[in-house]
Every structure is written in structure tokens, then in C-alpha cells.
Amino acid sequence: MATPGKQGGNVLENHDTGYRTNEDNTPQEHHENDSFANNWEVEQAYAYILTNAGQPTVYWKHYFDWGSDLRNKIRALINARKVAGVHAGSTVHQQDNARDNGVYAAHVEGRNGDLYVRIGGNDGKWQPSHSGYEGYREYARGTGWKVWVGLPGNPPVRQAPFNDPLPVPEPQDPATIVVSEDDVK
């Protein structure tokens, strides 16, 4: 398992948060065990993945099959990311004063504002004010982690807009589908 914030350590990736299964939900060979033993480790993994630069992925099973508590925490993390405008090219500033206290903390620059994350410890070990940041609000929390967002004017907590769902195509009889020469190119 990767350790967030460990200097020279591994980076936690989306594929680290689960194991692969066959169509009948039995584990694939060499994937008999989840790399995380319990929910708090999965929560902390998502707190890291969903608050950092990149293009994060949430596993279907974690979101739909592990219960409403984890699903709601993932939703809150996604909302914080969207509200702050964190994107693949966001700049991440790890907080040395947090590392000195044995926790991972980062200030992530988004398009709309700033996101702050702490994994490990508690507010006494690190919160944004410990690094001189101000004008932020708590957006998400879980076992051993917390996320804050700082927006201009420090407005109340916001809900990011949802994208419109993709339209579901109507099923067609394959014999009736016409393919033109232009479609084949």
C-alpha cells in the first residue's frame, strides 16, 4: 500500500483501492484480497485520490455496494473537488509543518478556489490555519481525514451542479441499422 505524503514514497493510484472480480463477483486469480482491510483505509485513499491533481476514478463497488456512509463521503469529496475547481493540472503544495507532525496535508490550487486536505492525525495536528491560510470551510470529513475549501468571500458550503445524464439510446434491431460508406471511414 502506498503512503500519501511520505517523502520519496509511493503514490496512491486509483487501481490501489480495490481488487478485480469476474462476472460472477468471484475474485480474479492473484486478486483474492482487497489491498485495504477496512473502510477507514478506503476513505483515506479516496480523500487522497479525489483531492489531488489528476483524473480520479471511483470504483463502482465502493460507491454502490459498500453502503451509504462511504458513498456519502465520496460524494462530499467529489463536491469539494468540483466546487474548488481542482483539475488534472492543479498545483499541489504539501505542507511540511503537517509532515513534521506525522500527517499528510496539502493545499491544492483549483480554478475557483483552494482545497485543503489532511490525512491522519486530527485538527490539533494540522488544519489550514496552521499554515496561515484563512477564509475556508469544512466540506468533507471521515475517519482520520478532513477536507476544507477556500473560495473568494468565504461563502457558505456549496453544492456543485450535476451534469445532465447522458441520453439512453433506444434499442434497434441490428437488421434495420443502415451504415453508410462515410460511417466506415
Image (cartoon, rainbow, N blue to C red):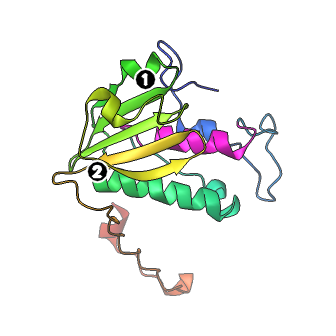
- Which label's residue is closer to the chain start, 1 or 2? 2
In percent of width and height, residue 176 lies at 49, 87
Callout 2 amino acid: Ala
What is the secondary structure assignment of the residue under circle 2?
A: helix
In percent of width and height, residue 74 lies at 52, 55
In percent of width and height, residue 158 lies at 32, 64
The overriding secondary structure of the stretch rendered in magenta is helix
Q: Is residue 68 left or right of residue 112?
A: right
Are there few (<14), some (14-19), or many (20+) residues within 10 Å of tag 2? many
Task: Tell me if I can see residue 122 in this picture.
Answer: yes
Q: Is residue 20 magenta?
A: no
Mark whose residue sits in front, 1 or 2: 1
- Image quarter where the N terminus lies is top right
In percent of width and height, residue 18 lies at 67, 43
Q: Which mark is residue 98?
A: 1
Q: Which mark is residue 84?
A: 2
Task: Tell me if I can see residue 63 in this picture.
Answer: no
What is the secondary structure assignment of the residue under circle 1?
A: helix
Q: Residue at x 43, y 55 (%)?
A: 78
Q: Is residue 99 left or right of residue 158?
A: right
Using the image, determine if residue 165 lies above or below residue 140: below
Q: CA distance from mark 1 to mark 2?
A: 22 Å
- Range of the magenta residues? 36-53
